[in-house]
Amino acid sequence: MKKCVVMGVTGGIAAYKALDIINALRKKDINVEVILTENACEFVTPLSFEVLSNNVVITDTFKREKSWEVEHIALAKKADLFLIAPATANIIGKAAHGIADDMLSTTIMAARCPTVFAPAMNTFMYENPILQENITFLKNKGYYFIEPDSGRLACGDMGTGKLQKVEVIVEEVLRLLESNKDLEGKNILITAGPTVEKIDPMRYITNHSSGKMGYAIAEAAARRGANVKLVSGPTHLQSPYKAERINIESALEMYEVVHEHFEWADIIIKAAAVADYRPLKVSEEKMKKSDEDLYLALTRNPDILQSVGNKKGNKILVGFAAETNNLQQYAKEKIRRKNLDFIVANNINEKGAGFKADTNIAMIIDKDGNQTQYPLMSKVKLAHTILDHVKWIMR
Ligand code: PMT
């Protein structure tokens, strides 16, 4: 039987992109039912949605275009997945506070299937702590969010708030329609983000890691039923669903936390970008400038992954390799030196790969030398691919 996605479209400039999402889902043989809010109808016409979905579009509770099915309960029961795209701050706020005053909000309340919000709005609205609290609240209740993209917004501002790319949304919908709990009961320790090494009270050394790769793995593992502890350097990301997040700043702090939770973990995945060096001395006072050149003495940080590899036992250990050249050679050296089961190697100079992007291009190399090159894909999809490899080793 065909899967059914119920799609809620709210009023925003990105509403027209919902048509592309419907088109892509229908190409995957998925039935799409659409609910347009009153405000959405100011931006798009129901007719376009009817033509593309091949279904009668519902615009509000009291218009009964399709009498046997317009009831919100019927629609909620029919849905294998509920997608709200674009989702405004208004619908997110309503859902978080149990407000059900139109067709879309009542259907969200009645839905038992996975419900996914793809927010799109002005960057200041998106960063507003009230909205962020609503998102965190809904995430903790099990709702899914597809983080918005960054760039130039319709209002001319630059920042986060663009509706995520259609292909990323569709990929996440397809994945959720097929998801299972194959990591139930497994304890997974994941590191993510950068480390920050203090120079003085004002200054520090860090790197470009946003945390997206590690957070995607944490979220994916939790969704697949694992118990997840996420050791995170400073990032702007929301905590992943159901993961226990432990914040650290420096490599030394990460070292302590990873070893503290070592016994607990069945699987350890190190996606963090750890500073190899830290300032030899941290000045307690702000360092004053002079006319002379300044040379900063650095000392080695411990290699956390290697220290874990030294006592790994039966645990599954996965490392990352971020390289700009000789990717395979360096990655293979790291597998051996750090005693890994496999490594995820990414060339951070490649477009769409490495730091900050929502996508990555990776090669997975295992300790026996088997290697698989993956094409450009979302970090969410790569996270699942990595977990599939872990499952394969556990078989
Ligand atoms: O966070 P994003 O913006 O999404 O970017 C993702 C990413 C580029 C950070 C990620 O895909 C990635 O490649 N992470 C590893 C970055 C890195 O530090 O690579 P490395 O080749 O220097 O280190 C190899 C491995 O050893 C890594 O698993 C690292 O976590 C670990 N390591 C490194 C140094 C150190 N002192 N201790 C460690 O544990």
Image (cartoon, rainbow, N blue to C red):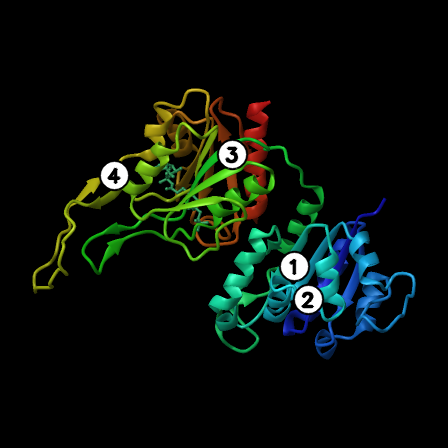
- Disc 2 vs disc 4: Cβ atoms closer than 8 Å? no
Q: Position of residue 77 (x, y in %)?
A: 80, 53
Report how far apart the C-alphas of labels 3 and 2 lie in the structure.
34 Å
Q: Is residue 306 left or right of residue 17?
A: left
N-term-proximal mark, 3 vs 4: 4
Q: Nearer the viewer, residue 85 or 207?
A: 85
Q: Which residue is mark 4?
A: 301
Q: CA distance from mark 3 to mark 4?
A: 26 Å
Asked whether residue 139 is in view, the answer is: yes
Mark 2: few/some/many CA within 10 Å (<14, 14-19, 20+): some
Using the numbered discs, state the Cα–Cα distance from disc 2 to disc 4 in whole angstroms: 47 Å
Residue denoted by label 3: 364
Residue at mark 4: C-beta within 8 A of ligand 1:
yes
Q: Secondary structure at mark 2?
A: helix
Residue 393 image point, x, y percent: 55, 24
Mark 1 residue type: Val
Q: Are marks 1 and 2 in contact (CB under 8 Å)?
A: yes
Per the image, label 4 sits on a secondary structure element best described as loop
Q: CA gap, disc 4 to disc 1?
A: 41 Å
Of marks 4 and 1, the one in the foreground: 4
The residue sitting at 40% across, 32% down in the picture is 329
Q: Residues within 10 Å of mark 1 (few under 14, many from 20)?
A: some
Residue type, label 2: Lys
Q: Residue furthest front?
A: 98
Q: Does the beta carbon at disc 1 come under 8 Å from ligand 1?
A: no
> What's the amino acid at mark 4?
Asn
Point out the quarter of the image occupied by ligand 1: top left
The numbered mark, 3 or 1, whose residue comes first in the sequence reads 1
Q: CA distance from mark 1 to mark 2?
A: 7 Å
Front: mark 3 or 4: 4
> Which residue position is annotated with label 2?
17
Q: Which three-letter amino acid code belongs to the residue tagged 3?
A: Ile
